[in-house]
Image (spheres, rainbow, N blue to C red):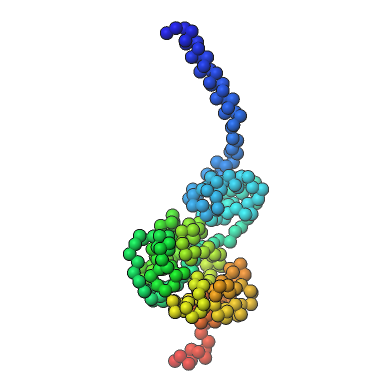
């Protein structure tokens, strides 16, 4: 090969290398090495429950933040956030643990089936096509999109009731099931002391009569719960009661006055039966 050709090719290669080096330096994006440190202590679930695109996105947000007050990893909870705070030299802010609750009690017993769906086993598809197999168009379709979305096997559809149930020991409050439900029936609520919670297990916004006809345990918007609550934790909107868990003191008075048993109390000890009632029952 001609020596001049070798020199020319060598020169072009050297020039290209210089140009690439200059371009790399000019457009180089600096990444804080602490992002890798924070990511290494995260659970690697990449569930999006923190509100960021994966664990690395959350790690990047933590490193750039001046405070961890508004940041939380629902899967790792307090233990992980304490490690993150230690790496960044910030204070770990304790966050109330959350858990998913299913706001529908339209079981096979409570809702009469009026038609039969024979299509794709997907709640999203079924919801786009029609209102469901019962007269309640707000209720659970029972096809399990929430189950498929959960990476922790924390939710399953009870074959007897047709309604999803949450395994409290496995739920990480990542919010995947919340986003998967086309009927917006699943909500993240404060887990509560001793895992005790009170919530309205209904999303029917129809007036009392039609709601009760569609489902025996539907909220009829009567307002009795709102009146009895001393903490202003209950509001009625669009014929539907809602309990604000940040205000609820778990007194259970609302549960007692609900005429349709639409308000659920979980993990409470059995109510004490007054002696007079016990005697009358003998």
Image quarter where the N terminus lies is top left
Residue 13: horizontal and vertical position, in percent?
51, 18
Residue 85: horizontal and vertical position, in percent?
61, 49
Q: Is residue 192 above or below residue 86?
A: below
Q: Is residue 211 visible?
A: yes
Q: Is residue 228 left or right of residue 271?
A: right
Residue 19: horizontal and vertical position, in percent?
56, 23
Q: Is residue 147 above or below residue 245?
A: above
Tell me the quarter of the picture where residue 70 sits: bottom right
Residue plotted at (49% across, 80% down): 209
Residue 75: horizontal and vertical position, in percent?
51, 55
Tell which of 51 and 72 is nearer to you: 51
Residue plotted at (58% across, 61% down): 96
Single out the residue that lies furthest toward the front.
129
Q: Is residue 60 left or right of residue 163?
A: right
Q: Is residue 268 visible?
A: no
Residue plotted at (49% across, 58% down): 179
Tell which of 154 and 47 is nearer to you: 47
Image quarter where the C terminus lies is bottom left
Tell which of 167 and 237 is nearer to you: 237
């Amino acid at each position: 090969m001609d020596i001049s050709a070798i020199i020319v090719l060598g020169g072009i290669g050297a020039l290209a290398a210089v140009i690439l080096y200059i371009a790399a330096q000019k457009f180089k994006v600096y990444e804080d090495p602490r992002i890798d440190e924070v990511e290494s202590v995260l659970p690697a679930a990449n569930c999006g429950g923190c509100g960021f695109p994966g664990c690395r996105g959350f790690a990047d947000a933590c490193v750039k933040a001046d405070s961890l007050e508004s940041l939380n990893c629902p899967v790792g909870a307090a233990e992980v956030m304490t490690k993150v705070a230690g790496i960044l030299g910030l204070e770990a802010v304790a966050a109330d643990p959350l858990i998913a609750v299913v706001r529908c009690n339209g079981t096979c017993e409570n809702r009469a089936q009026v038609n039969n769906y024979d299509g794709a086993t997907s709640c999203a598809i079924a919801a786009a096509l029609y209102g469901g197999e019962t007269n309640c168009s707000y209720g659970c379709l029972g096809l399990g999109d929430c189950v498929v979305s959960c990476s922790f096997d924390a939710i399953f559809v009870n074959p007897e009731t047709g309604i999803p149930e949450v395994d409290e020991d496995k739920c990480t409050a990542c919010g995947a099931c919340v986003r998967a439900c086309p009927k917006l029936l699943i909500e993240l609520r404060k887990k509560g002391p001793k895992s005790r919670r009170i919530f309205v297990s209904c999303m029917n916004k129809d007036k009392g009569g039609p709601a009760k006809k569609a489902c025996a345990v539907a909220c009829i918007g009567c307002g009795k719960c709102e009146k009895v609550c001393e903490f202003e934790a209950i509001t009625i909107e669009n014929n539907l009661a809602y309990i604000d868990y940040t205000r609820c003191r778990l007194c259970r008075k609302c549960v007692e006055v609900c005429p349709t048993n639409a308000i659920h109390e979980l993990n409470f000890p059995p109510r004490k039966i007054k002696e007079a009632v016990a005697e009358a029952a003998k």
